Amino acid sequence: MTRAISAAMLLCMAATACATSTEPVEIPANEIPFPLERAEASAAPGVQEHSFKVMMVRGRRLVSVRRTEVSALPLPELAVRALLVGPTESELARGLSTAIPSTARLLDVQVFDDTVAEVNLSQGFQAAAPSEGFLLRVAQVVTTLTGVRRITAVRFSIDGEVASVPTDRGEIVQRPVAAADYARRLR
């Protein structure tokens, strides 16, 4: 019998402890046993807002456009990824395009000695194009990356193999190339 009474008392206590109202109940601030503060939404660790330029094509010249993105990616990688996406709708409306094929993928980008970026792109970057088109796509990558702080030159790899690239002086080189190698394409 004591068990039945104990069980009944426990049941009554549980029932009275549960609120039966569906309305909110105000608790006076001095009865809250811990501090409540409004927490600001914070970004994940390492996430920052970056403002950078990417180079698009108008005719046979390069045009700088400003992009702002929030990302945890290193800025050189973020800039190349944004470049590979191509022009935005508003940029297309302004007559801008890209010489980079949509099949091109960024495999890696690393910066050595804070000045030379090594960009490793997929085979899609080398898709067939007139020589002027290939020169423009290389120039887009070089001038986008050299727009990132302290990067002065870019070395290209395709699927992990060092690649030769053209300059606007008609040379084919395997050395790191700089924006000056594409000065005739800049506007």
Image (tube, rainbow, N blue to C red):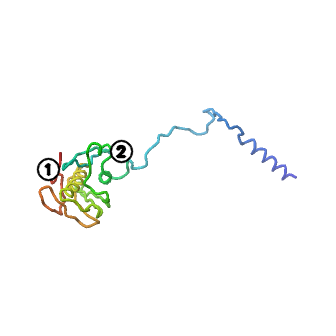
Quadrant position of the C terminus in the picture: top left
Residue 95: % across, % down:
26, 45
The residue type indicated by label 1 comes to: Arg
In the image, 142: left or right of 68? Answer: left
- Label 2, residues with CA under 10 Å away: few <14, some 14-19, many ≥20: few
Q: Nearer the N terminus, badge 2 or badge 1?
A: 2
Q: Residue farthest to the left?
A: 169
Residue 94: % across, % down:
27, 42
Secondary structure of the residue carrying numbered label 1: helix
In the image, 67: left or right of 130? Answer: right
Q: Residue farthest to the right?
A: 1
Residue 114: % across, % down:
24, 54
In front of the other: 83 or 89: 89
The residue type indicated by label 2 comes to: Glu
Residue shown at 19% from the left, 64% from the top: 164
Q: How many marks?
A: 2
Q: In this figure, which residue is indicated by the disc labeled 2?
A: 49
Q: In this figure, which residue is indicated by the disc labeled 1?
A: 184
